[in-house]
Amino acid sequence: MKKILTLPQAKKLLESIGEENLDQFQRRTFDYVSKFSKVDAETAEKLAETLVTEFGLEEEEAVQIINCAPKSVEELRVFLAGGRKIIEASKLEAIVNVLNEHRKLK
């Protein structure tokens, strides 16, 4: 069974294995997800649920949006351009606002 994971969820999974037990590929993956995770795993799960239930996005779309955390409606449109449904501008703005509320301060 396959499960789509956000980068923060993948990081949490790799951390549970223990850094000393990771093989070379897993270690490289861990380095990548550590650098590019924009939120923690729990927040990513909540965001995914929100994007799917409240905004009607597909799970795959939600995961990609969480992984990249677009900062504007224009950036967000890139992730939804291939979809068959049209999302209103107000919903796109609401999605960006939800992402901004949860974005990690760096």
Image: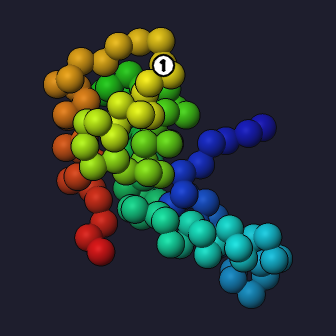
Q: Quadrant of the N terminus?
A: top right
Q: Is residue 86 left or right of residue 92?
A: right
**Is residue 30 positioned above or below 82 on the image?**
below
Whether residue 17 is visible: no
Residue at screen point 34% across, 47% down: 70
Furthest-bottom residue in this view: 20
Residue at screen point 47% across, 12% down: 84
Circle 1 packing at 10 Å, graded few (<14), some (14-19), many (20+), is few
Report how many numbered discs are placed on residues in the image: 1
The answer to which quarter of the image holds residue 81 is top left
Nearest to the observer: residue 78 or residue 84 = 78
**Is residue 3 positioned above or below 20 on the image?**
above
Q: Is residue 93 left or right of residue 77?
A: left
Q: Please, what secondary structure does the residue beneath circle 1 have?
A: loop
The answer to which quarter of the image holds residue 16 is bottom right
Residue 56 is situated, as x and y percent measured from the top left of the image, at: 38, 22
Residue 33 is situated, as x and y percent measured from the top left of the image, at: 57, 66
Q: Quadrant of the C terminus?
A: bottom left
Residue at screen point 34% across, 37% down: 76
Residue type marked 1: Gly
**Is residue 103 positioned above or below 57 on the image?**
below
Q: Is residue 44 left or right of residue 91?
A: right
Residue 64 is situated, as x and y percent measured from the top left of the image, at: 50, 42
Whether residue 42 is visible: yes
The answer to which quarter of the image holds residue 77 is top left
Query: Which residue in the structure is indicated by mark 1?
Result: 83
Residue at screen point 55% across, 34% down: 60
Residue 27 is situated, as x and y percent measured from the top left of the image, at: 72, 76
Q: How is the image coloured?
A: rainbow
